[in-house]
Amino acid sequence: MTGLTPDCAEPLAQWLEDPSGGGRLLVLTLNACALGPAGVRRLNRSVTSGRAPSLLHLEALANGEADDEQWGAVNAALAAEGGEEDVGDEASEKARVQEALKRNQRVYRETRFAALRLAAPARILFGGNARELDGDGESLGGGFPFLRLPIELQVHVLRCLVLLSPSRAAHLYPTLSRPPSTSFDIPTTLSSPLTEPQFLRLLAHCASRPTLLTERRIAAAHAAGEAPSLNAASGSKTWTTPSDQAQDPQGGWEEWFLRSTGCDRFERAAPL
């Protein structure tokens, strides 16, 4: 991408921070543009502040000095927004950005793994197939009468299963209304890698019979050596034979499930 000037930095950064805009972007390369140092630092702040949590890779190389006569006011405004993060040399700023991207990559994996781990118990317990042991159960050691609990407690138990594999980084990100924090030095704090909306979407998905039929269709396609099309925008209902270069055709179900529930990447929490 070329031709971007310093006045593009602020709207681009706001777009990256918007969950319904560029908040789902994973990779952004802006090499050989004319953003200038102040514009690049503004984009870096979106990452280091935790407001662009889905961005896993950012490149902004060869963005030389912008014309001070034309963009002086814009550069001054961008510089005025910077705080302590902008103090330091280029190497320290690059290190902060790389550390923030690594943190994004960590919560990206944690969110996906947590959702996939929760899929099986949620489908069994809330998909209509759960059965408790009957009279002979005592001879087999018995079991906790989970299905006789109120539905609120059943959901709470399932929610607690997420905390068996908690995130060590999710708490570092600001909520959608809280100002960003630069206190990234609390390694012992643990929190859920799934937000409450993600958990509820996953629960609704696993309790739905139509989604189970789609999953069975995907499994049948895999057994036949085929893989489903994941391009939901096209509305395609066809199955295609994966090419030799396809990456893990067995991953079709996982990607479909994660995208359907909105758990395919880390999501900043809404304010409590």
Image (cartoon, helix red, strand yellow):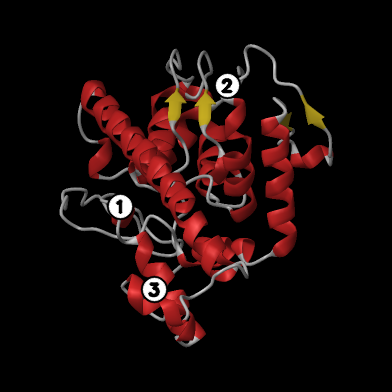
Is the residue marked by circle 3 packed among few (<14), some (14-19), or many (20+) residues within 10 Å? Answer: few
Q: Which mark is residue 157?
A: 3
Name the residue located 56 percent from the left edge and 43 percent from the top edge.
24
Q: Give neighbour class at mark 1: few <14, some 14-19, many 20+ (Cα, 10 Å).
A: many
80 up-or-down from 19: above or below: above
Give left or right: position of 5 versus 229: left
Asked if residue 48 can be seen in this view, the reply is yes
Q: Please indicate whether residue 232 sits to the left or right of residue 43 in the image.
A: right
Lower sequence index among marks 2 and 3: 3
- State whether residue 188 is above or below residue 124: above
Name the residue located 41 percent from the left edge and 81 percent from the top edge.
Answer: 145
Disc 3 secondary structure class:
helix
Q: Taking 154 as reference, is 49 above or below it?
A: above
Identify the element where label 1 is drawn: loop
Residue occupying the point 52% across, 28% down: 28
Q: Nearer the viewer, mark 1 or mark 3?
A: 3
Amino acid type at image mark 3: Val
Report how far apart the C-alphas of labels 1 and 2 lie in the structure.
Answer: 27 Å
Q: Is residue 159 left or right of residue 265?
A: left
Relative placement, left or right, of 179 versus 252 is left
Do residues under tags 1 and 3 come within 8 Å of each other at their CB atoms? no
Position of the C terminus, as image quadrant, is bottom left
Mark 1 vs 3, N-terminal side = 3
User: Residue 241 at x, y = what percent?
Assistant: 75, 22
Q: Position of residue 22 (x, y in %)?
A: 58, 42
Of the pair 248 and 261, the residue shown nearer to us: 248
| Three-letter amino acid code at the position of disc 1 | Ser
**Which residue does the numbered mark 1 point to in the structure image?**
167
> Which residue is identified by label 2?
247
